[in-house]
Image: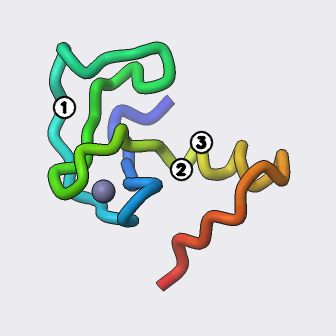
């Protein structure tokens, strides 16, 4: 486990976020929210899981 976690917004692809205990949910255990669009942030672990499951076509490459 790494204690340095990269978050990425699935909505606007931003990487700026704030964390709040009030925003902690089952799918967002860190309570990280995008500062731009307020979407729950996802980690690269999520992205990898999504990609491997074929559930999403998220493209985070610049
Ligand atoms: Zn966003």
- Residue 14: x and y in percent read 30, 64
In this view of the protein, which residue sits in the foreground, 4 or 54? 54
**CA distance for labels 3 and 2:** 5 Å
Reply above or below: 39 against 14.
above
Determine the residue positioned at 39% across, 65% down: 13
- Assess whether mark 2 and mark 3 are in contact (beta carbons under 8 angstroms): yes
Question: Which residue occupies the extreme bottom position in the image?
Answer: 62
* Ligand 1 falls in quadrant: bottom left
Secondary structure of the residue carrying numbered label 2: helix
Q: Find the distance from the CA under tag 1 to the CA under tag 3.
A: 17 Å
Tag shown at residue 19: 1
**Left of 8 or right of it: where is 15?**
left
- Residue 60, position as x, y percentages in the image: 53, 71
- Crowd tier of the residue under label 3, counting other residues whose Cα lies within 10 Å: few below 14, some 14–19, many 20 or above: some
Q: Residue at x 38, y 54 (%)?
A: 9
- The disc, 1 or 2, on the residue closer to the chain's N-terminal end is 1
| Badge 1 or badge 3: first in the primary sequence | 1
**Dots 1 and 2: beta carbons under 8 Å?**
no
Above-or-below relation of 62 to 21: below
Q: Nearer the viewer, mark 1 or mark 2?
A: 1
Q: Secondary structure at mark 3?
A: helix
In the displayed structure image, the side of residue 46 where residue 11 appears, left or right: left
Label 1 secondary element: strand
Q: CA distance from mark 1 to mark 2?
A: 17 Å
**In percent of the image, x 46 and y 54: which residue is there?**
10
Question: Does the numbered disc 1 mark a residue whose Cβ is under 8 Å from ligand 1?
Answer: no
**Residue indicated by mark 3:** 46
Residue that mark 2 sits on: 44
């Amino acid at each position: 486990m790494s204690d340095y976690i990269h978050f990425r917004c699935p909505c606007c692809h931003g990487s700026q976020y704030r964390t709040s205990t009030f925003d902690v949910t089952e799918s967002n255990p860190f309570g990280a929210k995008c500062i731009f669009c307020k979407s729950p942030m996802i980690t690269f672990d999520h992205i990898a899981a999504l990609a491997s499951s074929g559930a999403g076509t998220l493209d985070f490459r610049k």
